[in-house]
Image (spheres, grey):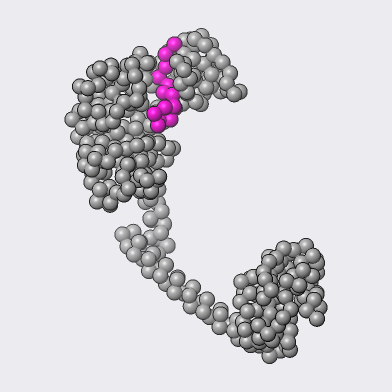
Amino acid sequence: MKDLFYYQDVMMQQFEAEVVSKGLENGRNYVVLSNTVFYPTGGGQPHDTGTLNDVQVVDVEKVGDEIRHYIEGTVDGAVYGKLNWQRRFDHMQQHAGQHILTAAFVELFNAPTVSFHLGAEQVTIDIAVEQLTEEQLIAAEARANEIILENRPIETKWVTEQELTSYNLRKEVAVTGDIRLVIIPNFDYNGCGGTHPTSTGQVSALKILGTEKMKGNVRVSFVCGQRVLAELGMRKKVLTEVAKQLSVPEAEAASALVKVLATQKNTEKALATAKDKLLQFEAHALIANHDTIVAEVLTQRSMQELQKLARMVVTEKPNGIALLATETEGKLQFVAARGEQVTISMKSVSTVVLPLINGKGGGNDQLVQGGGEILMTAEQLVAAMQKSCL
């Protein structure tokens, strides 16, 4: 392992090698090379991509003692390999940033990391604590960026199990045999097989984005390097647009948005109250224009409005029945409700009319509702409902 190109020189972007074997796995061609700079998926770090003789390398996996390069085509003999360096260096920045942030949490709060994931947009670590305060997050982020700014060397060293006792490791090493240590002197000593830049300064910057509870731990999301700039650019774009829509400076956008939302809630509450009052007036008008059975076709009403109106009618008229229907959004909808002095079950109404419109519905003896296809007019539907009550 220690002779692999990506361990000999982590900054190597191009190489020459020989194809030593090839195969087909689940419909994918792969080749095994005499040596490689392509890092395989492992240790929380995604695989590299790039080309072999201009053939795309789309995946790299370690299977047993082989490093398999899955390619979109075929290659033979001598190959010239080239990394997608932007992807690799991004992974190096994020992985080194993870080491630094993890070590900061241990140094400051004795809070160890129990898992790590390097995603396409963000990196996450799960910290073995029940909670992290905002002050702790700020302190850990500040300490991590302090280590980055100091541009400390990131060293690697191969040691034996017996030699491990000479190092103050952040956590126990799970592998045996030759063990690779990644070292930030006087800060972090950790067994790791991933790729990292040669100094902390190359991580550039680290920003914590948020936290969430995760199976008794706290998951911390963050970004490093170029991802910080991408995240900043995205947030700047959103903030600028929000401030523009609110006609306020960006620094005042948050407080202005709070005011807008508060006003909107008050407006929605007032509008709901006004709608209820209008429905109450409408209910009184319906009662005045009908006898025991209030049967009416309404225009473009929601199911919620039909239900409210029907309840208002039978509350005001306990010996009455409300049969309401509307045609909206390409379907027929209806509500049937009874007053407390009426004994007939409204389920009998839906039993009769639902088959007429190939519909579905539900409810109880006091109120039913349903909807279906426009196989008749709303007036015909109300007439059928009324007939079922006689």
Q: Is residue 370 left or right of residue 196?
A: right
Q: Residue at x 65, y 83 (%)?
A: 340
188 is higher (above) or lower (below) than 336? above
Q: Position of residue 118 (x, y in %)?
A: 40, 35
Residue stretch rendered in magenta on the structure: 34-47
Q: Residue 219, percent across and down?
A: 36, 44
Quarter of the picture holding the N terminus: top left
Question: In the image shown, does 320 or 12 lie closer to the viewer?
Answer: 320
The part of the image, by quadrant, that contains residue 278 is bottom right
**Residue 335 vertical position relative to residue 234 in the rendered view, above or below:** below
Identify the image quadrant of residue 93.
top left
Placement of 321 over or under 190, stated as above or below? below
Residue found at x 25% / y 24%:
155
The kind of secondary structure the magenta stretch mainly shows is: loop
Looking at the image, residue 337 sits to the left or right of residue 203; the answer is: right
Residue located at (74% from left, 84% from top): 293
> Residue 101: x percent and y percent?
28, 38
Tally of marks: 0
Q: Position of residue 194 (x, y in %)?
A: 36, 26
The C terminus: image quadrant = bottom right
- Whether residue 163 is visible here, answered yes or no, is yes
Q: Nearer the viewer, residue 27 or 77?
A: 27
Observer able to see residue 154: no
In the picture as drawn, the residue positioned furthest to the bottom comes out as 288
**Residue 349 image-quadrant placement:** bottom right
- Is residue 101 rendered to the left or right of residue 54? left
View extreme (front): residue: 343
- Write the residue at 26% across / 31% down: 170
- Above or below: residue 114 compared with residue 69: below
